Image (cartoon, helix red, strand yellow):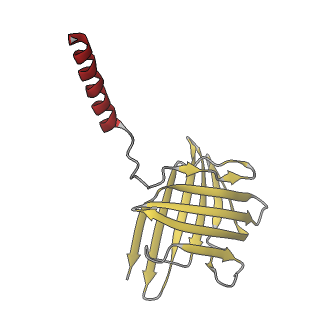
């Protein structure tokens, strides 16, 4: 009988410990997801930034995805017409599409650095979608073609280094 009571107590203690160590289902912020492809190959994103600036009613936001190691680095920069955290969500396109905000073709570019060599190409055509998940966590979906024919497709969800300066 004592063994049965001791066994039941042990089982109860284990059940209580397990119930307190289970995953929190309330956390709805997506973790980092990266399905971005450059010409069909994985584009490993080491860091992501979002910097918006404005003066009066004019401004824009630059969204950059950095990749690389050592002497080799790649930067994909998107530039959109929204410049506040409150207005960044939405659909963007170049050339202009009715109902979508403008994706800047001149400031949206891909740069590649290796040692002292540098290469850069601007946007020819593309669409971007931005969703604010919570805090500094955003989802950016893209389908881009650069002037040199390089393509970027997929989505990135994760924490960004975010700064908005509006004057």
Nearer to us in this view, 45 or 142: 142
Q: Is residue 82 left or right of residue 23?
A: right
Q: Is residue 78 visible?
A: yes
Q: Position of residue 34 (x, y in %)?
A: 59, 50
Residue at point 61%, 57% (across, down): 155
Q: Is residue 76 left or right of residue 23?
A: right
Q: Position of residue 84 (x, y in %)?
A: 44, 76
Residue 56: which quarter of the image? Answer: bottom left
Residue at point 41%, 48% (across, down): 25
Kindly give the residue lying farthest to the right in the view shown.
Answer: 149
Kindly give the residue lying farthest to the bottom in the view shown.
Answer: 57
Q: Is residue 23 left or right of residue 43?
A: left
Residue 3: which quarter of the image? Answer: top left
Q: Considering the image in quadrants, where does the C terminus appear?
A: bottom left
Residue at point 75%, 58% (across, down): 150
Q: Position of residue 154 (x, y in %)?
A: 66, 56
Nearer to us in this view, 28 or 119: 28
Q: Position of residue 1 (x, y in %)?
A: 22, 11
Q: As displayed, is residue 116 above or below residue 18? A: below
Number of marks in the rendered image: 0
Q: As displayed, is residue 18 above or below residue 90? A: above
Nearer to us in this view, 138 or 77: 138
Residue at point 25%, 27% (across, down): 13
Q: As displayed, is residue 79 above or below residue 139? A: below
């Amino acid at each position: 009988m004592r063994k049965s009571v001791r066994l039941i107590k042990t089982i109860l203690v284990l059940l209580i410990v397990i119930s307190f160590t289970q995953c929190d289902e309330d956390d709805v912020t997506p973790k980092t997801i990266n399905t971005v492809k450059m010409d069909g190959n994985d584009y490993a994103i080491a860091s992501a930034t979002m910097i918006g600036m404005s003066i009066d009613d004019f401004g824009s936001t630059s969204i950059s995805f950095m990749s690389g190691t050592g002497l080799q680095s790649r930067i994909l920069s998107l530039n959109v017409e929204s410049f506040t955290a409150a207005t960044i969500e939405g659909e963007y396109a170049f050339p202009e599409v009715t109902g979508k905000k403008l994706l800047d073709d001149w400031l949206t570019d891909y740069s590649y650095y290796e040692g002292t060599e540098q290469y850069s190409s601007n946007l020819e055509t593309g669409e971007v979608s931005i969703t604010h998940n919570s805090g500094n966590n955003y989802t950016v979906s893209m389908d881009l073609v650069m002037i040199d024919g390089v393509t970027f497709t997929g989505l990135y969800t994760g924490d960004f280094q975010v700064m908005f300066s509006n004057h």
